[in-house]
Image (cartoon, rainbow, N blue to C red):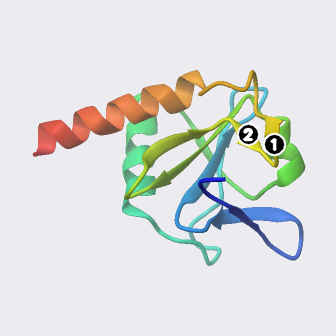
Amino acid sequence: AKEVWLIDAKGFVTEGGSSNAWIVTDKGELVTRHADHGILKGITREVVMTLAARQKLVVDERPFTLAEALKAREAFVTSATSTVMPVVRIDGKPIGNGAPGLLATELRRLFHTAAETAA
């Protein structure tokens, strides 16, 4: 495993060991936990929120469970070191089709394009 997801006492994913956790539900909703709930307020998270808004994507800031993540269409993490990194397996179980998701891949591309433009 390259990263771990931390689970709170109520069974909700809080964040990664050094990243923010995201899922895309089977209905196509982009979900990440709200940053006011004791999680890392990552700059990469904020940039991805902005990029998602520019693409007219709505981010649902709410808790999600590990069970919901396992049923998700895709999952990814954001961090300063990994930028936007697709998650293809959780506990050995494939997420979606077991390949990097289209949305995570597109957000990663947009992130790197924005970083290159700003440099």
From this view, report whether residue 85 is shown above or below residue 106.
Answer: below
Q: CA distance from mark 2 to mark 1?
A: 5 Å
Q: Is residue 29 left or right of residue 53?
A: right
Q: Nearer the viewer, residue 10 or 56?
A: 10
**x 65%, y 59%: residue:** 33
Element under label 2? strand
Residue pointed to by mark 1: 92
Asked whether residue 56 is in view, the answer is no
Task: Identify the amino acid type marked 1.
Answer: Gly
Which residue ends up furthest to the left in the rendered image?
Answer: 119
Q: Name the residue located 41 percent from the left edge and 35 percent from the top edge.
A: 108
Where on the picture, by quarter, is residue 98?
top right
Q: Nearer the viewer, residue 29 or 14?
A: 14
- On the picture, is 88 further left or further right than 66? left
The amino acid pointed to by label 2 is Arg
Residue 100 visible somewhere in the drawing: yes
Residue 97 horizontal/vertical position (percent): 75, 21
Residue identified by numbered label 2: 89
